[in-house]
């Protein structure tokens, strides 16, 4: 499906009803649902055969949409966001009341990211709330989809909508996952960005 004005209503209705969308990001393809929709989150875990102890992360086209979902954002973390967002960096923070436990696998923390991909940013721009709870587009244990064709092959019959990547493909380089406080930086996964 293309990100057109005609399809905007279909995408929003699908997500509101607990639907799942697959889309390109700057790293790999992802699948996502609305962060406050438990039906959608359950669907992601089921279709991926994902361990429910593994949390989803929150992604958007702008950091301002993500900040209400986290708390205790220090100066060092703010500097990282200014420097590396949008980009291949996932920052982990203490979750706020706004982030449901079904997104965080009952953990008190949540990762946030702003991918540097025009298609993904346009998708977030047209969805209500502008935020998706997300993970990679693959069955757990398999490699993530890298192209629209692969996304269709791997998950096309399991998700509700696959958004065409058009002109901005994934690079395949994973994001760095880190928790940055004013006292220390903890790297959970070293990816493209070095802190």
Image (tube, helix red, strand yellow):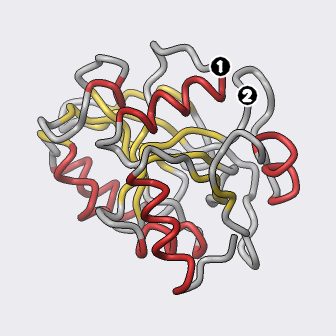
Q: Residue at x 66, y 53 (%)?
A: 27
Disc 1 secondary structure class: loop
Between marks 2 and 1, how big is the CA–CA gap?
A: 6 Å
Q: Residue at x 55, y 38 (%)?
A: 135
The residue singled out by tag 1 in the image is 49
Asked if the residues shown at circle 2 and circle 1 are in contact, with their CB atoms under 8 angstroms apart, the answer is: yes
Q: Residue at x 48, y 26 (%)?
A: 188
Q: Nearer the viewer, residue 122 or 20?
A: 20
Disc 2 secondary structure class: loop
Name the image quarter holding the C terminus. top left
* Residue 87, image x, y percentages: 51, 60
The residue singled out by tag 2 in the image is 139
Q: Quadrant of residue 168?
A: bottom right
Query: Please, which residue is most extreme toward the bottom here?
Result: 5
Q: Nearer the viewer, residue 135 or 22?
A: 22
Q: Nearer the viewer, residue 14 or 66?
A: 14
2 or 1: tag closer to the N-terminus: 1
* Residue 92, image x, y percentages: 34, 35
Q: Quadrant of residue 73?
A: top left
């Amino acid at each position: 499906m293309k990100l057109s004005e005609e399809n905007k209503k279909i995408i929003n209705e699908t997500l509101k009803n607990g639907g799942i969308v697959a889309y390109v990001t700057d790293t790999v393809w992802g699948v996502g649902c609305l962060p406050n929709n438990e039906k959608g989150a359950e669907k992601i875990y089921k279709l991926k055969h994902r361990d429910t102890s593994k949390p989803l992360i929150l992604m958007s086209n702008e950091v301002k949409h993500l900040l209400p979902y986290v708390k205790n954002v220090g100066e060092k973390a703010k500097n990282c966001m200014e420097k590396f967002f949008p980009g291949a960096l996932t920052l982990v923070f203490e979750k706020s009341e706004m982030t449901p436990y079904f997104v965080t696998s009952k953990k008190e923390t949540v990762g946030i990211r702003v991918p540097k991909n025009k298609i993904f940013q346009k998708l977030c721009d047209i969805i209500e709330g502008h935020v998706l709870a997300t993970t990679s587009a693959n069955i757990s244990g398999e490699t993530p989809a890298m192209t629209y064709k692969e996304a269709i092959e791997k998950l096309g019959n399991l998700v509700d909508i696959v958004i065409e990547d058009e002109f901005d493909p994934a690079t395949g380089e994973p994001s760095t996952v880190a928790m940055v406080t004013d006292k220390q930086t903890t790297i959970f996964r070293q990816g493209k960005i070095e802190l």
